[in-house]
Image (cartoon, rainbow, N blue to C red):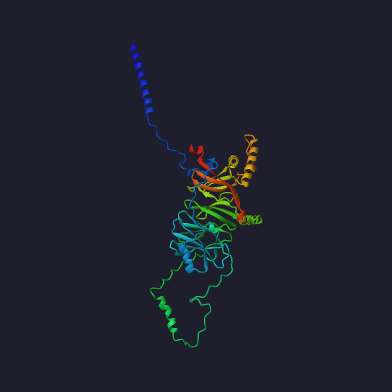
Amino acid sequence: MNSNLRELKFARFLICLGLTAGLFSACSETPQPQTPTGPTSLKEVPAVRLNFRYEADVPPPPEKPGQATDSRNAAVQADFDRARPNELLDRTIPAPDGKRILAVYHQLGDAPAEFRLDMYSAEGRLLRKVTADAMAAHFPDTIVWSPDSSTVAFVAVTRTIAAAPPTPPPTESEPATPEPTPAANTDPNANQVESAAPEANSNPEAAPQAEATPAPPANVLTFRTEQIYICNAEGDGLKPITQSEGLIYFYFVWSPDSSMLAALAATGREWQVLSFRAEQAKEQFVPLGRPRVIEKNGRERRLDDGLTAVHPVWSPDSAKIACAFNDQVRIYDARGDAPTQAAVLLRNHLLLSSQAYDREQASSLNAPNTNVNASSNAAAARSSANNANAAVLPPSALPDPNTLVSFNPIVTLNWVTDDQLYFETAFVKRMANDADSATSFARWHRLILTPQPSVLGQ
C-alpha cells in the first residue's frame, strides 16, 4: 500500500517537472521577426488610400531652378546673324545637361504665333531642322525638355497659308535675271575673272564649306488643332504622341522619371468661348482644360472631367499627379492596371483658416503706430466687421465666405516631397491692360500625406 502511494507521488512529480520544463523552453525562445506587409513608401499607396493633414499659412516652398525661356544662346545667335539673314531667332531652350540647344525662330512672312524649331549643339552648330515647312510650332512658352535631357516636347499644328516671304537679294550663285551673252567679248580680262572663282575655292586658307544640315523629317502627321510632339536630343525621331483632332493641348509637364507627360487640353469650342468672354470683359485670356496623362508611346488617359486653369504637378516619385479645382485638390494614380483618384476637400479648412487670417490681419492693422494706406484701412474695417458677424455665429457654424477677404481659390500647386504637397490661394485679376491686373491675399498652405491605417495593417 505504501509502495503504491510512493509510486503515484513520484509519477505526479515527473509530470509536473515535464510541464515546467516545457513552459520554460517556450518562454525562452527568441520571437522570430515578422516580415512587414505594409507599403514601404507612398509610391506603393494608391491615391484613394491616402490621409492628409492640413497646415495653413506656411512659408512658401523652395523655388525650383527653371530653364530660361526668353534668353538667346550667343553661339546660336551668331549662327543666325552670319548664315540665316531671312530668319529671326526668338529664343533658345537648352537641355538640362547643356549638351543640346533647341532654337525657336520664324521666317520672314510666317504667320504670327507660328514658329519653327532647329536642334543645335552646345557650340552653336546646327545639327538638324526639327520642323518641316508644313508644320508650325505653337505656344513656345510650353516647350520643355525631359529631366534626363533625352526628349523635348512641344505643340504643333499644320502651318497656315501665309503670304509669300519677301524675295531675298540676288546672290552670285542665283542671279535675279540672267544677262544676255554679248556677241563678242571685248574685255581682255574676262577670262581671268572667270577663272578666278575656282582658284579662290581651291585656296587652302579659305573658309571651309559648312556641312550639309539633315533635312527635317518628312511624312509626319500634322493636325488642325494643337497636338503634342516629341523628338530626341539629336532632333530626330519626331512624332505626335497625341492625335485627338479637335482638342487643343496647351500645357504639359514631364514626370521626374522622364517617362510620361501630364497635360491640360480643351476642345476648340471651349477655347473659342473662353477667348470671346475674356475679350468682352477686357481680360487676359486664361485657358481651362481637363487633365490627362500621356505616355511616350501615345497611350493617353483623361484624369478628370472638370475644367481647371491650375497646372498639374507630379509627385517626386512619378507615381501620382495632383490638380486643383477651386477649393479642392485631386490626386490621381499615374500608373497601374486599376488607377485610383482621391479628392481632398479643403473648403471648410480654408474657411476657418481664412477667418483666423483675417482676424490676425485686422489686429495688426489696428495696432498703434501702424502706418497703413487707405486701402489697407478699408480692408481692416471690412475684416473687423466680418469678425464681429462671425462672433455671433454658433460654435459649430462655418463663416460666410462672402465676409472673408482672404478666402480665395487655389491658383498654384507645388509637390516638394512625396509626403508634402504645397498649394497657394490668392485673388488674381488679369486684365488686358496689365496695369489694371492685381494679385492679393496670396497665401501658401501645405498637405502632409500619409497612408491610411488600413493600408499600414495589410
Observer-nearest residue: 61 or 168?
Answer: 61
Q: Vertically, is 185 above or below 211?
A: below
Image x and y of residue 223, in percent: 57, 61
- Where the N terminus falls, by quadrant? top left
Image x and y of residue 3, in percent: 33, 13
For the point 50% across and 86% down, the residue is: 182
Q: Vertically, is 236 above or below 367?
A: below
Residue 330 as seen in the image, left or right of residue 6:
right
For the point 45% across and 69% down, the residue is: 212
Residue 241 as seen in the image, left or right of residue 433:
left
* Outermost residue, left side: 3
Q: Quadrant of residue 197?
A: bottom left
Image x and y of residue 311, in percent: 55, 51
Observer-nearest residue: 195 or 11?
Answer: 195
* Outermost residue, right side: 280
Figure disc tally: 0
For the point 37% across and 20% down, the residue is: 16
In the rendered image, is residue 420 in sight? Answer: yes
Image x and y of residue 294, in percent: 52, 53
Q: Vertically, is 411 above or below 11?
A: below
* Outermost residue, front side: 369
In the rendered image, is residue 351 in sight? Answer: no
Q: Quadrant of residue 188?
A: bottom left
